[in-house]
Image: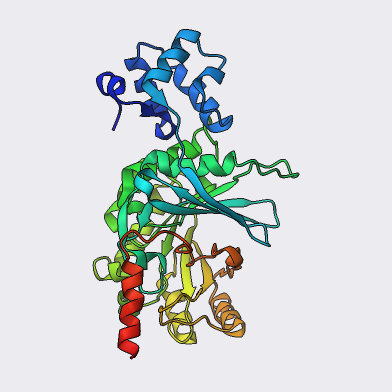
Amino acid sequence: MTPHTDSVEAQPVNLLGLSRQEMEHFFVELGEKKFRAPQVMKWIHQEGVTDFQQMSNLSKALRERLEKVAEVRAPDIAYEGVSRDGTRKWVVEAEGGSLIEMVLIPADNGRRTLCVSSQVGCSLDCSFCSTGKQGFARNLTAAEIIGQVWIATHSGATYEDGRKPVTNVVMMGMGEPLMNFRPVVSAMKLMLDDNAYGISKRRVTLSTSGLVPKIDQLGDEIDVSLAISLHAPNDELRNELVPLNRKYNIETLLDACRRYLDKCPDARMLTVEYTLMAGVNDQQHHATQLAERLRGIPCKINLIPFNPFPGSGYEKPSRNQVMRFQHWLFELGHKAPVRVTRGDDIDAACGQLVGRVKDKTRRQQRYIQTLSIDAS
């Protein structure tokens, strides 16, 4: 919600999560000119400054006023770890003590991709996802979402290649981004804004399990890259793996993806996330069905070997089976890179986001207890 002067006077406004339009409105209500918005945005997002007194191109009177009515507050860091492969993981504390995770994944080509969370937990309860076993606590605010980018950008890590600390962002962390639509879109607009992080729209990706109406709404507001968590080539199997499929089936989802790509002003490719589980969705007939489903859609298929977690009931396929599945898709005309597992020694790999996160709902604990009872 856009802040108003009366509410601003009563409680400090966290400027970290305000888009340029919201920041302009904030300063207009303070009796200032709109150009103050990009000035302050650059201090916050590009310079990492949170102390208004250090914002030297603002008047002394404005700096003193901002100290009374505003603040720049990122989530607190509860834990930071660096993997053997260079992957960095943070556990950060949001309002009310909820813990979320973010992961910065380096690549050999100099790309550094930040995986950002949008919710505390997740309500979709996909059967193969460890995060979903936590249950859902709440949505994150725009400040808590962009705060993850702020932390990674100003973490103090140094790189010799001259690139930005964060070159790519994927909304693939904890939660379903489209179930927290407005804060997620606001945060992504800051990622793209030249007065903030200036990341290319092709380098910001939103991943969804398939909230079809929100995909259509997203295409009306922003044109970042789109990824879908598919994981199955037919509705019968996907109903088991991704319960949301019972409401929006595969064809309905793919039709929404086609509409989204058509709205993009340039040629764009859909990313299809496909987690391979041994004996579940990794056979040749699955590859054939998947290729047929995606016929005519410009896309690449990210193959993700399953990362086991206690009580999941699924197993990781062998490396040979993963390679066979990739080969089958290649023969059918599809690009299908295999995602390399990164940061598994610090619980940062895909599917391991539960890690040491505090389980507010105790849902995961009850889930494991239930499995133990059933087994006995």
Q: Is residue 351 left or right of residue 157?
A: left
Q: How is the image coloured?
A: rainbow
User: What residue appears at the point 29 percent right and 71 percent down from the top-left corner?
Assistant: 243
User: What residue appears at the point 42 percent right and 18 percent down from the top-left corner?
Assistant: 66
Q: Position of residue 368 (x, y in %)?
A: 36, 76
The quadrant where residue 32 appears: top left
Q: Position of residue 158 (x, y in %)?
A: 70, 43
> Where 206 sits versus 68, above or below?
below
The quadrant where residue 172 appears: bottom left
Q: Residue furthest bottom?
A: 376
Q: Position of residue 210 (x, y in %)?
A: 34, 61
Q: Nearer the viewer, residue 259 or 38?
A: 38
Q: Give the position of the C terminus as an image quadrant.
A: bottom left
Q: Nearer the viewer, residue 247 or 261?
A: 247
Q: Is residue 200 visible?
A: no
> Where 189 sits versus 102, above or below?
above
Q: Tally the numbered discs.
A: 0
Q: Is residue 199 visible?
A: yes
Q: Give the position of the N terminus as an image quadrant.
A: top left
Q: Position of residue 336 (x, y in %)?
A: 56, 70
Q: Residue furthest right?
A: 160
Q: Is residue 238 left or right of residue 93?
A: left
Q: Nearer the viewer, residue 215 or 35?
A: 35
> Where 14 sits versus 333, above or below?
above
